[in-house]
């Protein structure tokens, strides 16, 4: 059940990334955020109630609420036209919590690939804080692309591999290293590609540059 929910997390992150890039109307994306947010609240509740008191299962399921509430918050906010600062500052909390869950994945759950994936999510939610909480609009293109790519790399693809049994066929070290290398390459490589371009202004009349332009 957890992998099924992860698949739809990939879908909603991809959709939200495309929305941030301006290709999807925010109100159109709101409904899907509500669908996935509801799923991401029901899923950990079920997993916790059926964990039989197993602390590791409860720990693994508890982090899902962080994202379920994010998507519900985003969905309601888009429909109601709310200011995004609330989601932005909540995202800072999620980013900090994700670092803790990364540590827990490495040290307690012994799941190295998802230890790396939690770091991806910490980075992404920190970007949401910068974009939505601090209103750093110059990051819009960067955040949109990172969101869409992370939807595939950290959720949709792992979910598919888990559901089909292929995930277990790879060593944890191999998966963790591959994810780490790709994550760094993505974060760095997208910076020059998404940097806002400065608008070139025409030379003002009466200046030397303007006079030269007029003679050309």
Image: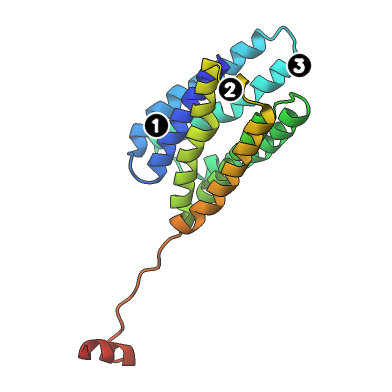
Under tag 2, what secondary structure? helix
Q: Earlier in the sequence, mark 1 or mark 2?
A: 1
Residue bearing the label numbered 3: 55
From this view, report whether residue 161 is shown above or below residue 96: above
Quadrant location of the N terminus in the rendered image: top right
Q: Is residue 159 visible?
A: yes
In the rendered image, the residue lying farthest to the right is: 107
Q: Is residue 99 left or right of residue 10?
A: right
Query: Which one is in front, 85 or 207?
Result: 207
Q: Nearer the viewer, mark 3 or mark 2?
A: 2
Q: Position of residue 183 (x, y in %)?
A: 58, 43
Residue bearing the label numbered 1: 30
Q: Is residue 77 visible?
A: no
Under tag 3, what secondary structure? helix
Q: CA distance from mark 3 to mark 1?
A: 34 Å
Quadrant location of the C terminus in the rendered image: bottom left
Under tag 1, what secondary structure? helix
| Disc number for residue 19 | none
From this view, report whether residue 48 is shown above or below residue 59: above
Task: Tell me which residue sits at (57%, 17%) in the image.
Answer: 2
| Disc number for residue 167 | 2
């Amino acid at each position: 059940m957890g992998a099924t929910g992860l698949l739809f997390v990939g879908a909603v992150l991809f959709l939200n990334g495309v929305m941030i890039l301006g290709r999807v109307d925010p109100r159109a994306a709101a409904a899907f955020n509500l669908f996935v947010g509801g799923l991401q609240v029901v899923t950990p509740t079920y997993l916790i109630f059926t964990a039989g008191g197993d602390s590791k299962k409860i720990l693994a399921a508890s982090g899902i609420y962080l994202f379920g509430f994010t998507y519900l918050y985003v969905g309601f906010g888009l429909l109601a036209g709310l200011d995004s600062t609330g989601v932005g500052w909540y995202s800072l909390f999620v980013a900090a919590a994700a670092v803790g869950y990364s540590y827990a994945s490495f040290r307690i759950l012994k799941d190295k690939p998802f230890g790396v994936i939690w770091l991806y999510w910490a980075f992404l939610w920190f970007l949401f804080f910068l974009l939505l909480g601090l209103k750093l609009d110059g990051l819009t293109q960067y955040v949109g692309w990172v969101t869409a790519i992370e939807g595939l790399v950290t959720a949709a693809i792992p979910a598919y591999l888990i559901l089909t049994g292929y995930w277990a066929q790879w060593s944890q070290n191999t998966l963790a290293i591959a994810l780490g290398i790709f994550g760094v390459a993505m974060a760095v490589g997208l910076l020059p590609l998404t940097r806002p371009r400065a608008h070139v202004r025409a030379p003002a009349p009466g200046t030397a540059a303007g006079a030269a332009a007029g003679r050309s």
